[in-house]
Image (cartoon, grey):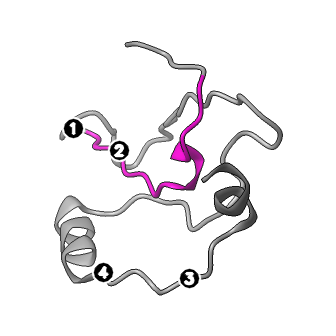
Amino acid sequence: MEIRHDTRGEYKLTRGYFIPDGLLEYGKDNVVAVRVYDGFRDGGIYEGPIGLIEQSKYTKYWRSYKPPKQKKDIWELIFQ
């Protein structure tokens, strides 16, 4: 896996990670780790929602998702 050390706004992206069938052990404690690169300031996962969801529900959500119209944030104003 290639690790880039430049930033192009990836920190603002919503992410989803696929967990293959059989990897989690139901009824037992499981640990899911996500590696985070902190290239500038407040790195890490610090806003939610965070959780696990069935793939069918995830797909249904994204097929119906309509992003809200937003004003440009400070980063876009500075770096565009």
Distance between the Cα atoms at labels 3 and 2? 26 Å
Q: Position of residue 21 (x, y in %)?
A: 18, 41
- Which dot marks residue 65? 4
Q: Can you tell which quarter of the image residue 64 is in?
A: bottom left
For the view shown, which residue lies furthest in the top direction?
A: 2
What's under tag 2, amino acid-wise?
Tyr
Task: Say which element carries label 3.
Answer: loop
| Earlier-in-chain disc, 4 versus 3 | 4
Task: Say which element carries label 2.
Answer: loop
Q: Which residues fall within the magenta stretch? A: 6-19
**In-image side of 12 versus 28 (left or right):** right
User: Which residue sits at x=46%, y=86%?
Assistant: 68
Is 18 magenta? The answer is yes
Task: Say which element carries label 4.
Answer: loop
**In-image side of 38 versus 54 (left or right):** right
| Earlier-in-chain disc, 4 versus 1 | 1
Residue pointed to by mark 1: 20
The residue carrying pointer 2 sits among few (fewer than 14), some (14 to 19) or many (20 or more) residues within 10 Å by Cα, namely: few
User: Which residue sits at x=21%, y=38%?
Assistant: 20
- Which dot marks residue 70? 3
Mark 2, mark 1: which one is toward the viewer?
Answer: 2
Q: Is residue 65 above or below residue 10?
A: below
| Earlier-in-chain disc, 3 versus 2 | 2
